[in-house]
Image: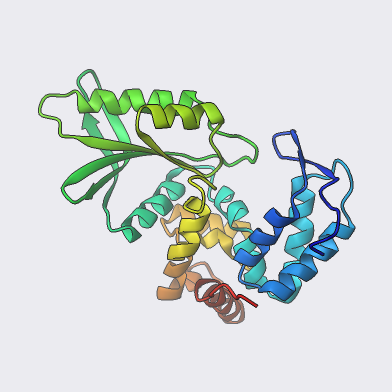
Amino acid sequence: MRNANTSRYQIRKNSGELATFSAEKLRRSLLKSGAGVEVAENVLREVSRELYDGITTREIYRKAFNLLHGHGSHFACRYSLKKAIYEMGPSGFPFEKLVGYIFQKKNYKVQWNQVLQGRCVTHEVDLVLEKDRKTAFVECKFHSEEGRNCDVKVPLYIHSRFEDISQRSGAQKYSGWVVTNTRFTLDALEYGKCVELSLLSWDYPKAKGLKDLADQFKIYPITVSSLLSAEEKQSLLEKGHVLASEILQHPELLRKEKISIERKERIIKELQKIMHHENRKN
């Protein structure tokens, strides 16, 4: 499979742009599901056989997801983490909670939805972080539609708000973050570097992006489950239950959703496998 010439195919991204198919990128995503090298290579081989010029990334994802699901739904669930985060909408608040839990794992004290006085006006800040006597402000930009990236206007606007807060009388030194579940444009990344505004997206910084942190700390949203219905997921989110781990700690939440005992057992078993995995090397 590694020698197959799959790089000749042009695939269509969600943004509408064309890009060269990367077998290595798909391989890495499959391995991150925890399925192991043999399964990943088998799935990659099957997907590669059905490639053609103009195939969409959505179609490639669907084929890989279905093949992984045949080896275990928990593999497919972890592979579909990005889609699961999209499903946390339309409100951005569940995503804000998810991001806050990740920062808690990084030993920050987190406060959500704080109203802070700036020099000119007041601002509602998604997250206020405290660590080592230092303060950081975080703004979360959630998109429920694939292909919508954050351009330079986003960090420009957010940086101006953080600057107004910092200029109020008696303000202490702070740092700022912008976190998105999609990607930043090159201009946005350059601007962030220039003004020392930390940016965190789905795959940025490299190997330390949102997907990497979620896997590292096992911070998975309840929407990662393939057995909960869309209505059940939305109901749990609206009640403030964001993490898959919450269901494992409080299985009575499923009973409140009027889920049968049989389904409840299957859902819990799937979530246990998702939460307690270790990426296999072979």
Task: Please give left or right for residue 222 compared with residue 103 in the image.
Answer: right
Task: Please give left or right for residue 230 compared with residue 136 in the image.
Answer: right
Residue 4, compared with residue 7, is above or below; it is: below
Which residue extends farthest left? 170
Front-most of residues 265 and 173: 173
Q: Quadrant location of residue 25?
A: bottom right
Point 54% across, 70% down: residue: 258
Residue 244 visible here = yes
Residue 220 visible here = no
Residue 89, compared with residue 153, is above or below; it is: below
- Location of residue 4 in the rendering, given as x and y in whole percent from the top left corner: 85, 59
- Location of residue 281 in the rendering, given as x and y in whole percent from the top left corner: 61, 75
Front-most of residues 83 and 8: 8
Q: Quadrant location of residue 267?
A: bottom right
Front-most of residues 223 and 46: 46
Quarter of the figure with the N terminus: bottom right
Residue 275, compared with residue 55, is above or below; it is: below
Point 50% across, 76% down: residue: 276
- Location of residue 180 in the rendering, given as x and y in whole percent from the top left corner: 49, 41
Point 53% across, 75% down: residue: 278
Point 74% across, 50% down: residue: 22
The tally of labels here is 0
Which residue extends farthest top? 120
